[in-house]
Amino acid sequence: MNRAFDYNGVLVSASKPEKKLRTVKKVISIDSGDRDTSKFYTNGDFTVYLPRQYGDVIGVRLMSAEFPPTVFTSGVGGALTHTYGGGQNNSSSSYSADVALGKGTFYFFLDIDGLSYSDELATNGNRSGYCDGFFAKIPAVSNGTFIEFNDKSGQDNITRFHPALGTLDRLRIRVRTHAQQGNTGFMYWTSDGAYAASGNRTAEFTLCLELEMLDNGFDDFSTLETRINSRS
């Protein structure tokens, strides 16, 4: 037992802090509209800077996400596909050849550079595949207004790291179809269903990521005054 003291007739005992290794979790909300639109014209391939540097990250999980529908819906928007060969600058000619997605798109992929640890088969019967090809797979099922994903109803999209990531302070996010594997292009959303250069009217999406990090601190009872020495 810890040494007890008489404090105005009350027996008290100083707490005995005990160090403990544990994990803590942090949730980050990312909106594609938060990107620098002067550098990243569309929301199909962009980089965002996180509000702080996160260290010793051992897991990244996609908790939930909301996307506009892939097929154009009046007043909401729709998705188009873009190829890198068509250019990535902000001129109209760079996006004028983009193609709207049809009703045959049942899912799409979310890539995050450095965090994509899921393997993917190659298209057209190619025997070679793509290792660490994507981070998350999103069903393109719309509720009539938008595509809603959460890890309670969809698959568990999580990447774990051993050893832990030293520092995570930015994310490069790319949204694409299965046919756009190997960094050949991306898909993006516009509010009017036309290519992005027609007024830059993008329809944004949002992601909610959970980071799991290692923490070297004290246990939950280190600030509790007690004469009990054992934590068991």
Image: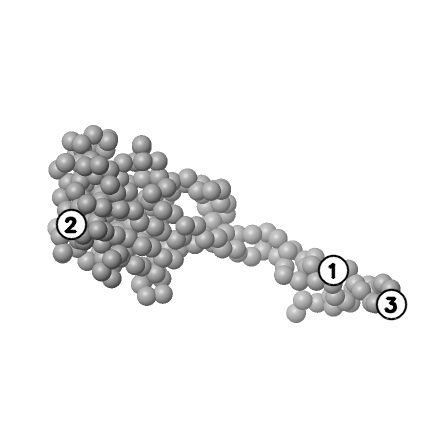
Q: Which residue is mark 1?
A: 15
Q: Position of residue 6 (x, y in %)?
A: 86, 64
Towards the viewer: 224 or 77: 77
Marks 2/3: CA distance?
77 Å
The quadrant the N terminus occupies is bottom right
Q: Which residue is mark 2?
A: 101
First reached walking from the N terminus: tag 1 or tag 2: 1
What amino acid type should be assigned to the residue bearing mark 1? Ser
- Density class for disc 2 (Cα within 10 Å; few <14, some 14-19, many ≥20) is some
Q: Quadrant of residue 86?
A: top left
* Badge nearest the viewer, 1 or 3: 3
- Density class for disc 3 (Cα within 10 Å; few <14, some 14-19, many ≥20) is few
Q: Is 231 left, or right, of 161 in this rendering?
A: right
First reached walking from the N terminus: tag 1 or tag 3: 3
The residue at the point 30 percent across, 59 percent down is: 148
State yes or no: discs 2 and 3 in contact (Cβ < 8 Å): no
The residue at the point 59 percent across, 51 percent down is: 216
Q: Which residue is mark 3?
A: 9
Q: Is 221 left, or right, of 25 in this rendering?
A: right
Find numbered disc 3 in the image and state the secondary structure of the residue it sits on. loop
First reached walking from the N terminus: tag 2 or tag 3: 3
Residue 162 appears in the rendering: no
Check the image and report above or below for 169 versus 205.
above
Marks 1/3: CA distance?
19 Å
Marks 1/2: CA distance?
63 Å
